[in-house]
Amino acid sequence: MPQKHQKESLASSIDKLRGTEAVLPAPAPSLPLPTINSPAFRKHGDVILVVIPTANKQETDPLTKTFSALKPSNVKIHYISAPSESDVGEQPYDDAGVEDVRNRIPNALRELSESTLEEKKLVLDSQLSRSLKKLPRRG
């Protein structure tokens, strides 16, 4: 008998809630996104190196697809995945997500700036060779 009472109670609760649903806007983060000013990395010509501070494909794919779709046709983009620490733990949400971005970008740029010339060359060679392999063969 108690199970039947629970089912009726649940059903009547659902009926009372029906029609009260509302679509809410996404929460606005209370922390502003940072402005990244980096005089060490300036634009030269029509080739852009995009440093993405994660190796997570679910995060990198939308970025690379969007950048590639929005770029002018004369611009070539090379992407480097430079995973870096966010200092906020795994799977951040709410304001921690903004803090994650705020920390990862400068950390990735700092790590690239502080790495030796040989380390930079290895990273670039690795990324460019993968990009070149994806290009259609002329023949």
Image (cartoon, rainbow, N blue to C red):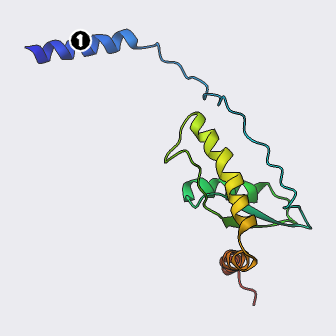
The spot of residue 132 in percent (x, y) is: 71, 79
Residue situated furthest right in the rendering:
45
Residue situated furthest left in the rendering:
1
- Relative to 84, say whether 98 is above or below: above
Q: Quadrant of the C terminus?
A: bottom right
- Relative to 32, say whether 50 is above or below: below
Secondary structure state at the residue bearing disc 1: helix
Residue corresponding to mark 1? 9
- Give 66 or 91, whichever is nearer the viewer: 91
Residue at point 72%, 80% (across, down): 118
The spot of residue 42 in percent (x, y) is: 88, 61
**Numbered-mark total:** 1
Disc 1 marks a residue whose amino acid type is Ser
Residue at point 66%, 28% (across, down): 30
* Quarter residue 134 falls in: bottom right
User: Could you tell whether 87 is left or right of 80 in the image?
Assistant: left
Residue at point 57%, 38% (across, down): 96
User: Could you tell whether 58 is left or right of 124 in the image?
Assistant: left
- Give 2 or 93, whichever is nearer the viewer: 93
Residue at point 28%, 10% (across, down): 12
- Give 85 or 129, whichever is nearer the viewer: 85
User: Could you tell whether 48 is left or right of 86 in the image?
Assistant: right
User: Could you tell whether 87 is left or right of 101 in the image?
Assistant: left
Label 1: how many Cα within 10 Å (few below 14, some 14–19, many 20+): few
* Quarter residue 39 falls in: bottom right
